[in-house]
Amino acid sequence: MIPHSVLDLSPVPEGATPAEALANTLDLARHAEALGYHRYWLAEHHNMPGIASAATAVVIGHVAGGTKTIRVGSGGIMLPNHAPLMVAEQFGTLATLYPGRIDLGLGRAPGTDGATMQALRRGFDGADHFPRDVVEVMGYLGDPDPAAPVRAVPGAGTHVPVWILGSSLYGAQLAAYLGLPYAFASHFAPQALDEAVEIYRRTFRPSASLARPHFMLAINVFAGEDDAEGRYLRSSQQQAFANLRSGRPGKLPRPVEDVTTVVEPAFLRMADGALAVQACGGPATVRAALAGWIARFRPDEVILTGAIHDHAKRRRSFEIAASVMEEIAAAA
């Protein structure tokens, strides 16, 4: 079976608080662990009223401490916002507390708006230091060097697995050059997906940590008891994306029967284009969609996400998805 995982942004639904969103995250992680999901990743976003995972390493610790076996990590940490040493110390500490269970996915985008980016990155000089910073983080997490003037404590010797995340060809090229696993953000930016996967696989260079390319595909899943319920659940994400792109970010909206009545056509087209890599509907429809994406891109892993307003429905969606992945594996 292809390993399947969960990407969670700790959505804050309309009518709820960040505290409730974080409680829901832990509950979903425990549910995912019981369902056989392989990883549970959390993402860094800032100044977003509808996302509660801004302090990503803290939330990872919360989830890892409340689960037993599932791998927990970042999808991802936006490295330009942080000093590499601090990232290594945070994830080295997590790996020390929860050995063998922590992943570090690194992204190049700031994950926020310009004003917040400046608040996060005081003294930023405008240069792209991402490749250098990735190598620096890996150095801090690698074998201890007694002669090194700076060491991550905890961190040195933990060998936390590092992933490159991306939504463009840049990340694919860097992951291939460094010989690292690669996760593409196809759940919100699928435009360069085909070319990025091809470049990553074709130009991959084996490394000490990875002998062959390892590609993770992100897929939106909105699974209901039937196709109509799946479309209904998806309407929250459509509204949220349209609101974000129109400069009105907020909490995750309640679902609606007809999304065209609340989202302007141009913004709905934009949202649907961004969310095109998806499996939406009842179990049979979700199975066909997931099987189609897997057959097309042949990922080594898939990571499933889906912002659904009602937490019980979100739990059920991942439950249906897990069952469908088992059926796909059995058929293969």
Image (tube, rainbow, N blue to C red):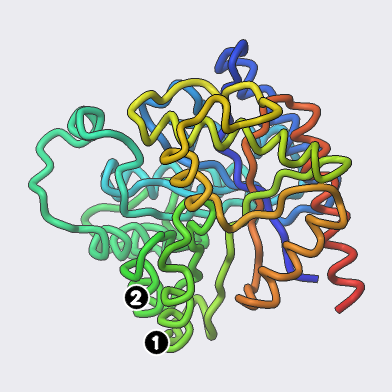
Q: What residue appears at the point 79 percent right and 64 percent down from the top-left corner?
A: 288
Whether residue 162 appears in this view of the structure is no
Quick check: 61 above or below 290? above
Q: Residue 221: x, y in percent?
A: 69, 48
- Where's residue 61, x and y in %? 58, 35
Q: For the residue marked with disc 1, what is the amino acid?
A: Thr
The kind of residue tagged 2 is Gln
What is the x, y in percent for residue 193? 47, 68
Q: Quadrant of the N terminus?
A: bottom right
What residue is shown at x 27% (from left), y 33% (from top)?
113
Mark 1 crowd level (few <14, some 14–19, many ≥20, 10 Å Cα): some
Q: Nearer the viewer, residue 134 or 242?
A: 242
Residue at image point 44% right, 51% down: 155
The residue wearing badge 1 is 203
Is the Cβ of the residue at disc 2 closer than 8 Å to that at disc 1?
yes
Can residue 49 be seen by looking at this rendering?
yes
Which label's residue is closer to the chain start, 2 or 1? 2
Image location of residue 188, percent across then percent down: 48, 50
In front of the other: 89 or 192 = 192
- Return the residue at label 2: 173
Q: Residues within 10 Å of mark 2 (few under 14, many from 20)?
A: many
Q: Secondary structure at mark 1?
A: helix
In the picture provided, is 329 more to the left or to the right than 43?
Answer: right
Image quadrant occupied by the C terminus: bottom right
Question: Which circle marks residue 304 in the picture?
Answer: none
214 left or right of 204 in image: right
Please tell me whether residue 117 is drawn above or below residue 215 in the rendered image. above
SS assignment at label 2: helix
Image: 93 above or below 285: above
Judge by depth and name the residue closer to the eye, 264 or 176: 264
Q: Which image quadrant for residue 119?
A: top left
Above or below, 35 against 171 in this view is above
